[in-house]
Image (cartoon, rainbow, N blue to C red):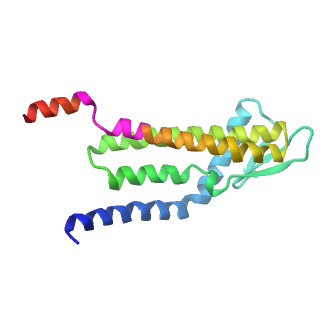
Amino acid sequence: MNRNWLRVVGRLGLTFGTVYAGFVLLLDPWRYAEADAVTWALNVVGVDRVRGGYGNQVLVMPEHHRAFLASISPSCSALAAVLAFGAIALFLVRGEPRRRLVAFAGAAGVVLVCNMVRIALSIWVGLVTSEHGLTVFHDWVGTAFGLIYVLGGFTLFLFLLLPSNQQLLKEATNAG
């Protein structure tokens, strides 16, 4: 193995290791914060039959059905995607640190906001239907929406990170 290979393997190891360690360390407090934030946002817009403060669970009290607790599972959390964008910006891509920070912030912002909307919509569907309605919405619509907004965040990440065509042309002209 040459040095370049070792650097690449080392950077990949740092990326995966950071995401894994961050996920293990931050998972519970992050999900508690997500549950509280979604409950707060729903209450702000007038949805008053939803209560937080149950760790990673939200109490949903449909008017015509039995109340239930909606859990934010590890796979429903935005934590993994946010940590992945952060680790990629930190360890895998090169370039100006400010540009990498802006790319990370943009991608993480898209993922955070869209994930909150996805969780809130799932809870709202459960509120107007039942626990089963929440599950069906979450499993089908929520999963599709999750894939779309992570891809959207990644696209924004690349857009903010990569140089523009104007900049590439200027650099090519100056080099030639």
Residue at the (72%, 41%) spot, across then down: 122
Query: Magenta span covers which residues?
Result: 156-166
Question: Is residue 158 placed above or below 4 in the rendered structure?
Answer: above
Residue name at image x 49 percent, y 60 percent = 22
Residue 154 image-quadrant placement: top left
Q: Main secondary structure of the magenta part?
A: helix
Q: Position of residue 50 (x, y in %)?
A: 79, 41
Q: Tell whether position 146 is magenta.
A: no
Residue at position x 71%, y 32% in the image: 44
Q: Quadrant of the C terminus?
A: top left
Measured from the top left, where is residue 172 in percent x and y? 14, 33
Q: As drawn, is 117 to the left or to the right of 163?
A: right
Count of numbered circles in the view:
0
Specify whether 63 is left or right of 50.
right
Q: Is residue 49 visible?
A: no
Please tell me which residue is depicted at 72% across the width and 29% down the height of the picture: 45
**Quadrant in which the N terminus is drawn:** bottom left
